[in-house]
Each structure stands twice: as structure tokens, then as C-alpha cells.
Image (tube, rainbow, N blue to C red):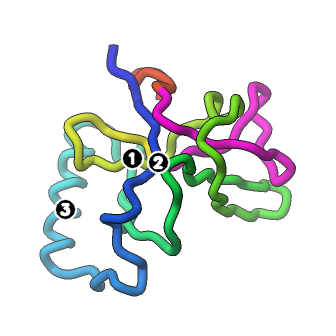
Amino acid sequence: MSQVVLRPMQWARIQDLHDCEPVSEADLVCMRDVRAALARHGKLDRFALHLVHKHFDMGADEVLVEYSDAGTREQYFKVERADSETAREAQPTTWMLDKLEPIAICVCARRPDGHQGRHERGIGIESVALRSMADA
């Protein structure tokens, strides 16, 4: 069974946001092709696109973790160490597709009861096989 592998993003090869070109006509053509592939697989309501970029460098032992607070309707990302126990329970949310198999580069903090919030700490991933593609 395939595994989703989480590892820190290779930040050195990713452009800073201010260096990224605006979306071009060629990008739109590509997006239409990606949309067609998602439609063929019935996944239009499961996956989306995002512009790969960075705002700062990250260490090899760090990963980006998404947090949300439904009460305040806030969402934010935080760099965390890639070796915490909580990270093994995190939900992958962003993948790089430049390799043969998808590599998760961002995870969403969660606990067994499903609660997520600002008070959680110490979430990170190194190269951990997290969950099967079927469970994702």
C-alpha cells in the first residue's frame, strides 16, 4: 500500500513570494489540464492548487504546521520541529509533486478527538511515513 511521506520542504529551490511571477496564460492552461485530471478522477472537491513559494528559510529539521481556530475564524502557519509525537497525528494538507510519489510538506495540527487550536505546541515532521493514500 502506498504511503504518504512527510519531509521538510526543500526551501532552497523555492522562490520567495516577491520573486514569483504573476500567473500567466501558460499557467492557466496548466491549471485547466490539472482540473481536467482531477475531474476525471472525481477529485475536484478534494484537491486544489497553490503557488509554491516561501516567506523565509527553514531548517532541515523543521516543517510548516497549519493551525486553525474555528471560534475566532483564524488560520495560521507555524514552523515547528520535525520530531514531535504530535506530528505523527497531523493531517497532511500540502504536497509537492516534483517527485514520482507525492511528498507532504505541510500538515494540519490535530488530536485524536479532532480538536485543533492555538494552545497546541511541538508539532513537526521529519521523514515520517504517516498514513496510506487510501486513508488520506
Which residue is located at x 40 percent, y 61 percent?
11
User: Residue 18 at what x, y percent from top left?
Assistant: 41, 86
Is residue 114 left or right of 89 when viewed as pictured? right
Quarter of the image that includes the N terminus: top left
Tell which tag, 3 or 1, sits nearer the viewer: 1
Q: Main secondary structure of the magenta part?
A: loop
In terms of sequence position, does the residue under pointer 3 or pointer 1 come before the other?
Answer: 3
Is disc 2 placed on a helix, strand or loop?
A: loop
Contact, CB < 8 Å: mark 2 with mark 1?
Answer: no
In terms of sequence position, does the residue under pointer 2 or pointer 3 come before the other?
Answer: 2
Asked if residue 50 is positioned above or below residue 124 in the image, the reply reads: below
User: Residue 82 at what x, y percent from top left?
Assistant: 59, 42
- Type of amino acid under label 2: Pro
Report the span colored magenta. 106-128
**Label 3: which residue?**
32
**Label 1: which residue?**
95
Is residue 77 left or right of 32 when viewed as pictured? right
Mark number, residue 79: none
In the displayed orientation, state which residue is furthest to the top. 1
Is disc 1 placed on a helix, strand or loop?
A: strand
- Between the C-alphas of marks 2 and 3, the distance is 29 Å
- Type of amino acid under label 3: Arg
For disc 1, the neighbor class at 10 Å (few under 14, some 14 to 19, many from 20) is many
Tell which tag, 2 or 3, sits nearer the viewer: 2
**Label 2: which residue?**
8
- Between the C-alphas of marks 3 and 1, the distance is 19 Å
- Type of amino acid under label 1: Trp
